[in-house]
């Protein structure tokens, strides 16, 4: 099985991970290979009862294993972990996407100052090294060096990925503002200068982050497969009610990267400034939520500011949002904060969870005020044309704590009138309305589809901009 896994999964060459049934078994193995010329212990994790082992040849490895009772250990490769880099810029620019720029809080539905969000919460960033940018107050930033050879504790060259990710979660300056600028930041470098890490190092980083008091761990990295030691690390974190947030990946795949593919992990896909799925963002039934991931302004090395693309940007936005909910609702655990965000996400695509958007797009404004009976925010969530059947489905979501009554919906070019009364929509509910479309010469549908909500007099709408939605159909 070990050789089959080696051939199947890109892994560290001449390395293996061994997990043991007990601390005594681990100690016995370490004593057995002491002084060996063909085997070398690179790192040991007491919490995971595992070792990262280098071997000169498979024969050396087999000889050592043959001296151990089979029931005392498990052997696996050490899969590579990498940063989920987006496609080349020329390919990204070919997509008709709108960059977010420095409008993160506006996108999240937040109009209030967020200076105190995240206070008392620790967010761990397992990534490339985080730079000491001014957007991280020195009294909030802690760097934990795992002591792994080849992984620098300070960023060098162009490897600003960790800094960019951290700033989106907890940055405080206006030009590199994160969601939770008062949160404590624990940076744990697990990625080498070549952009690669490995499963053992990430697993150990998770355990060390939990032991250091992190309530939220962000992983804007991934591997094509999991590993027993990674599953053990996730078990360790979840048993202590720590939230794990991970990037879905940028492979334009129907399979999420690991650990995002683990159903217990908060997997995050990417959308642009208009809330449309970024085409290269991985999708699949395991996807939990989406967040901005195209042209998002953030920090980089040497105090630079860049526009950051990909699910690497999306994940820390969600991590920061969890920290914000925890601080704004004292006593809320990380898992409870995530549940508030999950159940108050802005609908996207068809009603209900779907592979492209998960439970929807993060809506921090709604999540923070979901129990406020004075806040009302009805929205047109999406327009879904069915060209073959010449119909348009309009998805409407009531992002309010009160029912929506007395509203009308106006839809462009419907066959029987332009304005329809809307049945009452309960708080938090989503409804879909399918209407026939008029034909236009040479087309099955009009070139532009539009829908608008008309609210009853006196209703104060928290986000009136989402009462209208327009969709431009491509040429046939």
Image (cartoon, helix red, strand yellow):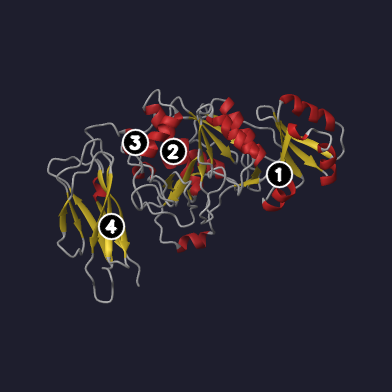
The answer to whether residue 40 is left or right of residue 257 is right
The answer to the question of whether label 2 and label 3 lie on touching residues, with beta carbons closer than 8 A, is: no
Sequence order check, earlier mark of 2 and 3: 2
* Nearer the camera: disc 2 or disc 3: 3
Query: Which label sits on residue 367?
Result: 3
Q: CA distance from mark 4 to mark 2?
A: 35 Å
Number of the label disc, if any, that sits on residue 170: none
10 Å neighbourhood of mark 4: few (<14), some, or many (≥20)? some
Q: CA distance from mark 2 to mark 3?
A: 17 Å
The C terminus lies in quadrant? bottom left
Above or below, 310 against 369 in this view is below
Q: Secondary structure at mark 2?
A: loop
Mark 4 sits on what residue?
A: 393
Rendering coords of residue 435 (x, y %): 23, 60
Query: Circle 1 sits on which residue?
Result: 77
Q: Earlier in the sequence, mark 4 or mark 2?
A: 2
Q: Which mark is residue 178?
A: 2
Which residue occupies the foreground of this view, 17 or 319?
17
């Amino acid at each position: 099985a070990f050789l089959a896994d080696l051939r199947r999964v890109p892994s560290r060459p001449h390395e293996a991970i061994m997990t043991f049934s007990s601390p005594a078994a681990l100690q016995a193995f370490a004593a057995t290979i002491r002084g060996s010329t063909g085997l070398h212990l690179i790192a040991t994790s007491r919490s995971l009862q595992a070792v990262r082992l280098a071997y000169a040849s498979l024969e050396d490895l087999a000889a050592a294993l043959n001296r151990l009772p089979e029931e005392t250990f498990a052997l696996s490769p050490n899969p590579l972990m990498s940063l989920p880099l987006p496609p080349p810029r020329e390919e990204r620019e070919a997509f008709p996407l709108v960059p977010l720029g420095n409008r993160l809080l506006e996108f999240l539905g937040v109009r209030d100052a967020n200076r105190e969000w995240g206070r008392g919460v620790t967010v761990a960033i397992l990534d490339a090294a985080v730079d000491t940018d001014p957007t991280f107050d020195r009294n909030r930033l802690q760097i934990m060096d795992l002591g792994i050879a080849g992984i620098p504790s300070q960023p060098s060259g162009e490897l600003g990925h960790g800094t960019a990710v951290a700033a989106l979660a907890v940055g405080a300056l206006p030009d590199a503002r994160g969601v939770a600028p008062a949160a404590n930041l624990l940076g744990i470098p697990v990625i080498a200068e070549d952009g690669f890490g490995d499963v053992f190092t990430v697993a150990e980083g998770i355990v060390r982050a939990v032991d250091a008091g992190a309530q939220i761990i962000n992983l804007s990295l991934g591997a094509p497969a999991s590993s027993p030691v990674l599953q053990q690390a996730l078990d360790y974190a979840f048993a202590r009610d720590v939230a794990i947030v991970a990037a879905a990946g940028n492979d334009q795949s129907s399979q999420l990267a690991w650990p995002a593919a683990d159903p217990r992990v908060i997997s995050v896909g990417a959308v642009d400034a208009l809330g449309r799925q970024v085409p290269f963002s991985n999708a699949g039934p395991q996807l939990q939520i989406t967040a901005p991931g195209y042209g998002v302004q953030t920090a980089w090395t040497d105090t630079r500011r860049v526009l950051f693309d990909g699910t690497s940007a999306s994940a820390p936005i969600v991590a920061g949002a969890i920290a914000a909910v925890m601080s704004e609702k004292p006593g809320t655990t990380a898992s409870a904060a995530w549940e508030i965000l999950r159940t108050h996400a802005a609908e996207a695509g068809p009603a209900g969870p779907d592979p492209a958007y998960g439970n929807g797009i993060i809506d921090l404004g709604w999540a923070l005020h979901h129990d406020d009976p004075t806040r009302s925010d009805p929205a047109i969530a999406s327009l879904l044309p069915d060209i073959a059947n010449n119909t348009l489905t309009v998805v409407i979501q009531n992002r309010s704590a009160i029912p929506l009554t007395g509203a009308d919906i106006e839809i462009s070019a419907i066959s029987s009138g332009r304005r329809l009364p809307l049945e009452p929509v309960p708080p938090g509910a989503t409804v879909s309305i399918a209407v026939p479309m008029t034909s236009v010469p040479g087309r099955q549908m009009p070139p532009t589809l539009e829908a608008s909500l008309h609210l009853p007099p006196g209703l104060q709408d928290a986000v009136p901009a989402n009462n209208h939605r327009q969709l431009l159909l491509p040429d046939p």
